[in-house]
Amino acid sequence: MEGYPHTEGYDEDVHAALVGEEIREAEGLELIPSENYVSLPVREALGSVLTNKYAEGYPGKRYYGGQEYTDAVETLAIDRAKKLFTCDHANVQPLSGAPANIAVYFALLEPGDTVLGMDLSHGGHLTHGHPVTMMTKVFNFVRYKMKDVETGEIDYGEMREIAKREKPKLILAGFSAYSRELDYEQFVNIAREVGALTMADVAHIAGLIAGGVHKNPFDAGFDLMTTTTHKTLRGPRGGMVLVNKSEDIANKIDKTIFPGLQGGPHMNNIAAKAVAFGEALHPSFRNYAGQVLKNAKAMEEVFREEGIRMLGGGTSNHLILADVYGSLGVTGAEAEKLLDEVGITVNKNVIADDQRKPLDPSGIRFGTPAMTTRGFTTGESAEVAALMVSALKAVGDKAKLNEVRSAVRMLANEHPVPSTFA
Ligand SMILES: *Cc1c(COP(=O)(O)O)cnc(C)c1O
């Protein structure tokens, strides 16, 4: 425990929440695939005096004075981001993943223009045109799907047909609940046929790309990438837009983010991004990214042996989407609650063309980025998977659930959250 000496005795209510969350994170196993643990140096930057500073504009072109250090950290973050993803432009100011995507839409499209993205129940993200989002009032979203939900193969033939018919200005590759790698060349070929731009939203897999264990969409000729910085990339909560080989697009992105959509950038957060990108450039990050994949494979093996259906037939990345309702008769919401009771945090998730409702869907989604940060091996990951299955089969069996909870607590205690990674 690091402790929070400055809120202790000063604001007891907030202090209690900070300490409570720290204990919760230490004692349980975090399997939500979009979560991770940042290092203390990242938290130090987040908690720094840079939060005091207004820095509207970009390094060298600010609206206020006193920018010696803000320019330095933002330039570091930009240079490190470009190196990590081998591209020639980075905007590190988006406040999170959703604002980064919104910035791209407004930078490149006119109201009424069409965007082609992944169907949401097939793994696509809310920000790719879910009807509940404001973007659907402005732009027209159309969708492609998987051809075969048992292998996860995308239907590129259908994608081409839709693209020819709907004439999208932008084609999106990216997902938050899909467990296979995409064939980026196919996206680029289709986009070129219909004159569309290509954007990869790599929010979930940015760390796998930076760590060199997944393909980089820019190698296939993508125009842009958007990402969060807090998922597999293991940085502070935030977003970023990357552009390759187009000064015109880069300028449009910068203008749209500021002054188009945002005001002053959160400089403490940008400093923390710089620290996290520095960590990701370290050779040890490659081992981390590789271990994330190995651990997911180890969990996949256990689920397969237990006969539990996985969407896409398994995983090639950091996450698994399991059809617990179809395989065990436990709904996604019931499974989430049951696992919560034993100290394992996952999230309920719709599966492709789910017959159940989003608030109580058929699936659960879980993954290995956070537990790998805590040093879990493949053997221990398989153990966690086996504990999950035990819990899911022990509905109403208090004694069994207690037993699983003790085993989870023990594994967690053996793996404290590390302070630094390099
Ligand atoms: C998480 C995620 C986002 C949104 O990120 P926020 O930081 O929550 O706004 C966008 N796209 C994809 C694919 C994601 O997984």
Image (cartoon, grey):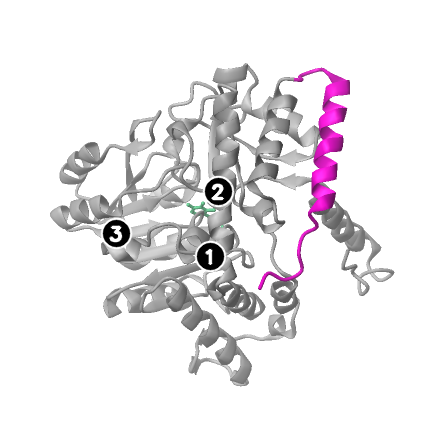
Q: In which quadrant of the rendered image does the N terminus lie?
A: bottom right
The residue at 70%/42% (across/down) is 412
Q: Residues within 10 Å of mark 3 (few under 14, many from 20)?
A: many
Residue 274 placement, left or right of 249: right
- First to last magenta residue range: 394-422
Q: What residue type is labelled 1?
A: Arg
Q: Can residue 196 be seen in this view?
A: yes
Residue 61 versus residue 277 in the image, above or below? below
Q: Is residue 110 visible?
A: no
Q: Residues within 10 Å of mark 2 (few under 14, many from 20)?
A: many
The image shows residue 193 at horizontal and vertical percentages of 12, 47
Residue behind mark 3:
198
Q: Is mark 1 on a helix, strand or loop?
A: helix
Structural distance between the alpha carbons of marks 2 and 3? 30 Å
Determine if the C-beta at disc 3 is less than 8 A from ligand 1: no
Residue 193 versus residue 249 in the image, above or below? above
**Is there CB contact under 8 Å for labels 2 and 3?**
no
**Is there CB contact under 8 Å for labels 1 and 3?**
no
